[in-house]
Image (cartoon, coloured by chain):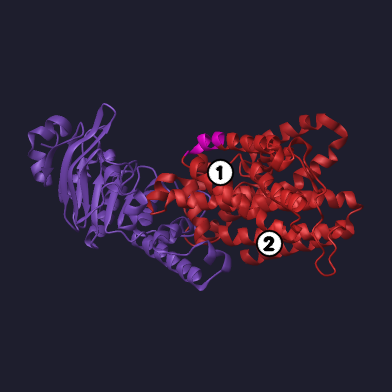
Amino acid sequence: MKLVNARTGWSLLLLLALAFPFMAGNDYHLTVMSTAYIYAIATVGLNLITGYTGQFNLAHSGFMAVGAYTVGILTVDHGVPFWAAFALSGFVSAFIGFFVGLVSLRLKTHFFSIFTLCVGYIMFLLIEKWESLTHGTVGIVGIPAPESIGPLDFSEPRTQYYMVLFFLVASLWIMHRIVHSLLGRTFVAIRNGDELAQALGIDLMRNKLLAFMLSVFFSGMAGGLYAGYVRFLGPGVAGVEHTFDMTMYMLVGGIGTLSGPLLGAIAVPWLTQYLQFLQEYRFVVFGPVLVLLVIFLPHGIVGTWLNRQRRKAAQSAITPTPAPRLAAVPREKGARHA
Amino acid sequence: MLEIESLSKRFGGLTAVNDVSASFARGTINAIIGPNGAGKTTFFNLVSGTIRPTSGRVLFDGRDVTGLRADQAARLGMARTFQTTALFDTATVLDNLIVGHRLRTRSTLVDVILGTRRLRDEERICREKARAALDFVGLSHLEARVAGDISQEERKRVAFALALSTDPTLLLLDEPAGGVNPEETDGLAQLIRKMAKSGLTVCLIEHKMDMIMNLADRILVLNYGEKIAEGTPAEIRANPAVIEAYLGTEYA
């Protein structure tokens, strides 16, 4: 029953996404949506290390920039076809992620976050200052559009939209596989507590490193798509504010859930669009909304809903032998942090 | 089964465990007691590989395991529980237990992405192990409950089940009856006896003397990191050094 519900939900979402270009008023809406999808891919990746494994990585946009610059540099300076460069983007990020992870994952909790914050900034500086490789502050201009595949012409907004959607769906599908497998359970065990996880025979470093590399793989791929979509790159892509944006998407939707980051990554940019008439003042609206959300829905929209569903399922499973204790003491919902 | 040879741990100038030797026989229940700060938990951490000893050796089934990491020790059959068990409170009890058997599986990322038969088989085995462990500790009826909703005593049992699902031969229990009421303590003692009867070697740290005196085959007493006595409950009860350091006259 639950599985069917989830499947119908996802199918409906996919149908909506497929129909969106025909409902969108203009190309600008398509652009907003496509960009949202690209950041959604990166956010889904960030959610693996931060949400599921519990290691709050703040260098994520740096890795997105690595993927983007992989495509930018290879296509513009070396004449490599887009698709070949794009295929590399995730792997280059994961490769660099291996070394960054090896050092940074020796640290725990906020020390890890602070360290990765610094790593992210160093990545930004490297991109900005290493002019011979990255064109510095001038940026990389004239990145070619993805080459046509058969009848699909990727210089057209609608085709581009579907291209990005394709990779988003693929990312979600792979992520679904990962988080619902033994591997995903291993990551969640680490999030619940290093000590217990290790006592259960889980090699902490190995699994954290795997989660980290997978996470930045998605980020790098999103960066590669970004390069092919926007077709211009500046060092700003690596800016830490993008990581904070993605973190906000996770918090709004529900950290450590599959659909939460997706919801956040799509809903927040649209909300920003609608609040654009307020100009800079929109943050006056945005800030308090976010604060309220974190206070009253610490598990995000999807997270809160899922927890309620799970509890309901558990209640109905135990109705034959009613437990008075459960009814008498409603437990705190944010107990994970207690 | 488990041999400890002059194990020591110094944290800077503080000697938390000082030259402790002990030996635990297969299928027995061994208690480690002592005042707060006597080094009991540190002793467990040294044996299970959570921290490395300054000197000394740990032999497990005749094999030198000194300096192995905790996850490596777990794979060799050493399981442990903690004073508090961090569970995934919004997931069901069964979901929390499935990962317990992960160390005996070999599925990798490739299996996950390709959805191989090996992964499916191993996931089934993990689920069965989790159910079996839950059944052993007498909580089968709670399998679908959300972990955050169960009682303290049930939580202790889930912690046992987690340890059992790793297929251990040695169980290290850190205050298995901490924070539960007297009747529940009796129930947990019975469960520990059942685990020993099934062939497991049990070591436990506990402050509840009534429980220990009835349950343990042998008792090791630590004080200021040093072993001050070792023996059967009757011997310990009569040992003047133990009475002086820990028990007082009530149990003498």
- A244, A307: nearer the viewer: A244
Q: Which residue is mark 1?
A: A333
Marks 2/1 same chain: yes
Chain B: give its colour: purple
Could you tell me what secondary structure mostly forms the magenta stretch? helix
Q: Amino acid at mark 2?
A: Ala
Count of number-bearing discs: 2
Residue B51 placement, left or right of B214: right
- Mark 2 or mark 1, earlier in chain: 2
Label 2, label 1: how far apart the Cα atoms are: 32 Å
Residue A159 picture location, percent across and down: 84, 61
Is A12 covered by the magenta stretch? no
- Quarter holding the N terminus of chain A is bottom right
Span highlighted in magenta in the image? A107-115
Q: Is residue B78 visible?
A: yes
Residue B237 placement, left or right of B166: left
Which of the 4 image quarters holds residue B233?
Answer: top left
Chain A: give its colour: red
**Residue plotted at (75% across, 43% down):** A268
SS under mark 2: helix
- B209, A321: nearer the viewer: B209
- B247, A179: nearer the viewer: A179
Q: Which mark is residue A170?
A: 2
- Which chain does the numbered disc 2 sit on? A
